[in-house]
Image (cartoon, helix red, strand yellow):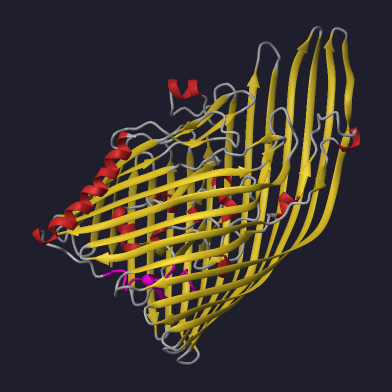
Amino acid sequence: MNMKKLLLGSILISASIFASSIEDYDIFIPEVDLGSSVIYSSTGFQTTVRDVASNPTIIVSKDIERRHYKTVDEILKDIPAVNIQYQMGMPIVDMRGQGNQAKTNVQVLIDGIPSNSLDISMVSSSINTMSVDRIERIEVIPGGGAVLYGSGTSGGVLNIITKRQTGPRASAGYSYGNYQGSKYDVSAGYTLGQLDIDLAYTKNDIKGYRRYSEENSDFFQGVLTYHINDDHKIAFKYSNYSSEKELPGSLSREQVRRNRRQSGKSQPWNTDVWSIDREEFVLDYTGRLTDSLELSVSAFHQTTDMNYKSFSATYGPGTNFSTVNMTANFDDEKQGIRAKLKYTYGDESSLVFGVDYIDNHLDRNMLNRISGSTAAGPMTVLNDIVVDTDIKLDKKTISAFILNTYKYNNWEFIQGFRYERADYNIFRSSYTTTNIRGVMTMPPMTIPMSSGITGTEIKSKKDMNNFAVELAANYLYSDTGNVYFKYERGFTSPAPALLTNRYDSNDMSVPAAMRGEYYLNDLSSETYNSFEIGLKDYIGSTQLNAAIFYTQTDDEIRSSGHTASQSEIINYNLDKTRRFGFELSSSQYLGKFTFTENYSYIDAKVKKGEDRGHKLSGNRIAYVPQHKLSFGVLYEFNERFNLGGDVVYSGGTYLTASNEGGKVNSHTVANIKANFKATNSLNIYAGVNNIFDRKYSDYVSYSVSSQEYSYDPAAERNYYVGFKFQF
């Protein structure tokens, strides 16, 4: 808590300085302020920030280059409204306290195209499949967006917008970090008449903090933009990302104490390997049809192929051993079209009509082989069990929306409505092959003990209809500031895999023929009602954003995954949850100094509901830090050299729905960075992360049955250096 007090004190001190004696300083006013900066994700068209009834954070390419980020999750960690979770080494974006529901309740877009995976069991959104060198801006809108984007926006919307450049250009860069490995990037572009050509390639060769933590990835993007005339253009984008990643297993508390950099491969021995290949084609048209009509159409096709391999082995005395070998293949294919028409009327009032169609298909095959040898007197028992699971899932959504913004003097009144229909096709099969036998050496003999094949298949079709509503009032009280109130009713339609449950194979109360079998459930869409009040302004040299929100969710979708002792899987609706909080951020510009302060508070808890007969009412929602604070400073020595640093505090989180295991993993991390522009073309940079060498974890889990913690330790103090040359 001392660090929280320090950072909060810094915010108050900065505010008092500016309120009392701002005239004593040589003030530098940046070119961009709330009155002229723009955002694209709030309506799908360019809109000034003060005309938005939300509390967005916008990170532009200049900020990314100045801070030398390597991956998208590094960028998002510095945003106070965003909490990054990790599952199997993959980042999950959380906003406004979604916790374990973040994968379905935060929409991640790339150039306005949804990138969330249809599979939510092991796969997260693909934010790190994008090279940071190709990012023009990242727009983060916490809380809502259901009218414009549909299902899964109660946490908010994240839109990564890539670069679309013109004119002759080229760049090359290299960086190295002791826990980040090497990164190479090159890009080039040229303009031929009305055609812009833009090509870029990035390669990462990462050697991670822990042993056997490695990743090799390649990213390529090509963009062709044809300017039909001043009012119309068409663009084609192709991108491909491929990677091979090896992940060490989680560590026990004792293993972390002994050596937090170890792989966890001693006893038991285990390793996880991911390979990913993601390909995307996008065709965009934007045009001004008349002085009052603008049209935007995007057609897209995405394929993401992922392969996961996991092997673990435990060896005991004598001939005793057991191995678990699992492979999983995920083939996610998504295609669709999004069209929006904006009609401007009256005194800058506007009406946006839109239709969306998305067809998402997933094939998932999992092969799990468990083998072992156990000494039983004069006999050795050998077992070989193979579980083959095949899943084919389809979710097609078609929707239409209307969003009206009516301006009257200094007031803006916003009304929006969306209707969405989702059609599901579900196929799931699971077959188990068992071969257990006893082997004796004296006399030589093999005794069959159990063998055979058991399994089941299930097919189903289902449809769901949902709607969203937005009502907001925005008062523009100055040329730069606004205060707003917003109400939103939104929804999350379930992922197809969640529409089936599985009986526990060891539950004697279930008929023998049904144990371990899947069956259809009656899962409903979750709905939420959200209220938000906010303020944005630029006063003198200070930029200020503030928002207070309250969200109540009915029928929140939860899943009770299987454990070592239970194979039962239950997907269910939790009666009622509540999330309340506020977000504060400010920036000051004092001569050569730039200061930033941010604080977010979230109180997320279950109001009513239970899991397998255990009441959860009053419990905190797992993996939601209640506090997050940051303080940053940048000093510009001259136009060629700057030095900056930041301190980020993240509060501890509960790890289970029952809140057993307590709140853990609060941490404070400080970083410094320097940037030197050696020539007009050459930029050299360096930095040190976690300069105070704090020990914390990227991910911590807790087993209620064994009452043990598992850790994925984060990197200790580390450095990086690099350069970028622009022609």
Q: Nearer the viewer, residue 70 or 156?
A: 156
Secondary structure, magenta segment, majority class = loop
Residue 450 appears in view: yes
Q: Quadrant of residue 27?
A: bottom left
Looking at the image, which residue is at 29% across and 44% down? 8
**From the viewer's perspective, is 663 left or right of 25?**
right
Relative side of 609 to 539, left or right: right
List x then y, in percent, for residue 261: 43, 29
Q: Position of residue 518 (x, y in %)?
A: 81, 43
Quadrant of res 726 = bottom left
Q: Is residue 588 left or right of residue 667?
A: left
Residue beneath the point at 35% across and 63% down: 61
Q: Position of residue 215 (x, y in %)?
A: 48, 44
Q: Does residue 134 appear in this view?
A: no
- Looking at the image, which residue is at 30% across and 39% down? 5
Decide which of 77, 136 is in the foreground and name it: 77
Provide residue 434's location: percent of width, then percent of height.
84, 30
Q: What quarter of the picture does the C terminus occupy?
A: bottom left
* Magenta-tinted stretch: 32-53
Write the residue at 75% across / 16% down.
Answer: 374
Q: Is residue 280 above or below residue 646?
A: below
- Quadrant containing the N terminus is top left
Depicted 168 relative to depicted 697: above or below:
below
- The answer to whether residue 146 is above or below residue 197 is above
